[in-house]
Amino acid sequence: MTRAPEMDFEDTQGARLKMALATIRTDIDAAFDELLPVPDDTRAQLVEAMRHAAIGGGKRVRPLLLVATATMLNVSREAAILAGAAVESIHVYSLIHDDLPCMDDDDMRRGRPTVHKAFDEATAVLAGDALHALAFEILTFEGVSADPFVQAELTRCLALASGMGGMAGGQAMDMAADSATYDLHTITRLQQLKTGALLTASVEMGAILARVPPSSRVPLLSYARDIGLAFQIADDLLDHEGDEHKAGKALRKDEDQGKQTFVSLMGADAARSQAKALVEQACGHLSQYGEDAGVLCDLARYIVERDR
Amino acid sequence: MTRAPEMDFEDTQGARLKMALATIRTDIDAAFDELLPVPDDTRAQLVEAMRHAAIGGGKRVRPLLLVATATMLNVSREAAILAGAAVESIHVYSLIHDDLPCMDDDDMRRGRPTVHKAFDEATAVLAGDALHALAFEILTFEGVSADPFVQAELTRCLALASGMGGMAGGQAMDMAADSATYDLHTITRLQQLKTGALLTASVEMGAILARVPPSSRVPLLSYARDIGLAFQIADDLLDHEGDEHKAGKALRKDEDQGKQTFVSLMGADAARSQAKALVEQACGHLSQYGEDAGVLCDLARYIVERDR
């Protein structure tokens, strides 16, 4: 795939994003390392499994969305990193459970054995559950905010995005896709729940940390919605034409299972155009923030250009 | 087993507790019925599975602990019921996941097929996850408290009690018990995490709703710790000598697996005496509340006398 010049990550925007992605990986790894000390008792395997899943892998798109939004709005980086670890904790738990034999039955994730492969299924279920609880524990830390109003709003936002009205609901629709035939409208709704809700929550939590009132969050949420959709279209494209080695996981599973995706419904070319249009629209929503929105715009472009 | 006169639930205390148990069951069922409307899309099966697990079964000991504590401290019943539904939501999710084939592999629970039997394993994993998120969503409802300080403290309390430092950590220790030999001290620690943490959180959440400051919660938490231990000893006794039909689930699994329990380590008679002594000690901690602590004391006695 040839890249248009403005998509070249060797240029200024590319260097800025590369730095942001590298820094967030280091910071989130350090946060999890501190949040997950291995206890000196028989819980050790549980915590090792949590560390296996949470440390040293992943693009950290959700924490970066949260931290970049918070930084743009002058929130301290330390607080944003902790809140970012909470969102990532939810994301990681969902990956562990989705990879289980009874769900997607995947052996590899982020280039390493999945938790139920490296440990066992029971430990994988439990490690996911413990990361789920950890997310909400983190949100009540003083380091996130000393203001209980902010803590409570972060909790509400993350809980809504994770549950049956968000990620878990989207996953349920995805599982039902084996027996139902979805049109483009329903696939969009499914993806808005399954991946969009948590991406949007990441941006909104940055705004909550900055005490942006709900009425002023509209441009940020519009940005998040557009990149959420672009992210999923890019994922479908990657699943359709990507490199398993680079992706670090099995690809073409949806196709093999005959599931509808944006690519199967729209065709690869139209899907690619749509993703790019969504990204430009997303960046447009942030015009009022000018140069301060640089990382968020770079990240939006990266989302459709990434190869893993 | 013959009952001592003071344990007879046909007397005054018995009637008061019977009423409290019946009322809490009705109220928690009603709360879940309202919290879990079945959506008109392919998430319907997920929500049906959540309802299967959450409605119409269980003794509701945790919600009753919370509501009885809150009522003793003059909190509105409506708020306490909602918070009780949050605690029960965590308890129910843990039962769904514990029953999975890769965990305890149980077919029956509360006299009905477990979720993975009534639906399928993937739905069971996801229904547990969605109930887990629901718990934290509930705690940020205005109906629980309009004060974000209370919402945040409830969230912290429930997250700590559910995660690797509480219920999930205890479950991990329990799983490791297959390969490790535990002494009485370690079994006590295991149970304090696995079941004690959530029982204690139930009482503490009642105190949080009533804005009892941490320094004044000591008697309540001492009560909770004692009945938590008594509850587990009673569970082990039930597992050892109970009636599967009344219990509504398979019994003698620990024994068959050669796991250490309070009964195997202490003997049934000593375990029974210990449970009764703990209950009297628990009630003693509440002396400052006088007659207002009646339901909590009745509940403590019920915990060691129940046959299911």
Image: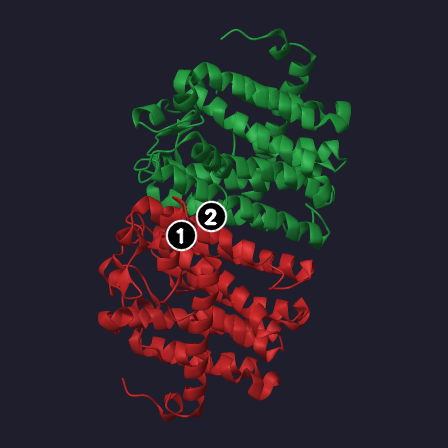
Chain colours: A green, B red
Residue identified by numbered label 2: A164
Name the chain under label 2: A
- Report the residue at 68% width, 58% height from top: B148
SS for callout 2: loop
Q: Position of residue B303 (x, y in %)?
A: 40, 76
- Vertically, is A225 above or below A266? below
Residue A245 image label: none
Q: Where is residue B228 in the image (x, y as percent from the top left)?
A: 46, 70
Res. A303 visible in picture: yes
- Residues A285 and B95: in front is A285
Residue identified by numbered label 1: B47
**Side of A208 where B66 appears, left or right:** left
* Total number of numbered discs in the rendering: 2
As shown in the figure, which amino acid type bears the numbered disc 2?
Answer: Met
- Report the residue at 48% width, 37% height from top: A189
- Residues B26 and B42: in front is B42
- Residues B275 and A175: in front is A175
- Report the residue at 45% width, 44% height from top: A168
CB within 8 Å, label 2 to label 1 = yes
